[in-house]
Amino acid sequence: MKRSYALETLSWEHHNGLVLVFRLEQGMQFDASVEEIKRYLLHVWQTALLIHIDLEEKYLMVPEYLRDLKDYLQQMQGDHQIFAEMMKKLNKMKSEQEIRNLIQQFSEKLKTHIRFEERELFPAFEKMLTRVEAKQLGGKLHEVHKPIDLSWPNEFWKRKNGSEQ
């Protein structure tokens, strides 16, 4: 689906979020080191996901949008809080099974969250925004957008022979 200029940078980041989910799921499927997957997820959380969340909350959770999109925006913010709680727990976890379970829960929640934003929240935004508002919002988001680097020295999401499934 073609996303409007107003929200396209956030959609690009959602694509990266789905790449993250794929990598986490592949790593688990290939029995990669759970500690390595944990370190990767915590790294992406700090370097990409927190930044994305901050942008969404700074530019979308504003009074003029809350009036019309309150339920959608509250769901978005609630999901963001759940992610933060999950990452706090993950950071302290030592048990491989608990880490594995939390990473699987996080992957599922992130996938569901991205679908919600792309299929419900963003279309509602696009209907609500005037052309001028869309251009202004898009301009602000484009100005602050920085490409996300999902690279990691150990590509645990690849099979041992080096191929991605």
Image (cartoon, helix red, strand yellow):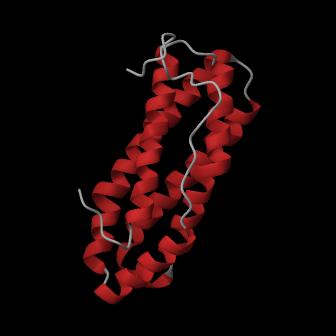
Q: Does residue 116 appear to the left or right of 78 in the view shown?
A: left
Q: Does residue 11 appear to the left or right of 1 in the view shown?
A: right
Up the image or down, 52 lies above or below 115; here it is below
Q: Does residue 149 appear to the left or right of 36 in the view shown?
A: left
Q: Which quadrant is the C terminus positioned in? A: top left
Residue 119's quadrant in the figure? bottom left
Residue 66 makes an appearance in the image: no
Q: Which quadrant is the N terminus positioned in? A: bottom left
Up the image or down, 63 lies above or below 45; here it is below
Q: Residue furthest bottom?
A: 132
Tell me where residue 6 appears, x and y as whole percent: 38, 73
Tell me where residue 160 appears, x and y as whole percent: 52, 10
Tell me where residue 21 appears, x and y as whole percent: 46, 35
Tell me where residue 49 appears, x and y as whole percent: 58, 51
Q: Does residue 101 appear to the left or right of 114 in the view shown?
A: right
Front in this rendered view, residue 62 or 9: 9
> Which residue is pictured at 46% across the width and 25% down the height?
25
> Which residue is pictured at 40% across the width and 48% down the height?
15
> Which residue is pictured at 72% across the width and 27% down the height?
93
Residue 20 makes an appearance in the image: yes
Front in this rendered view, residue 146 or 62: 146
Up the image or down, 108 lies above or below 162; here it is below
Q: How many marks?
A: 0
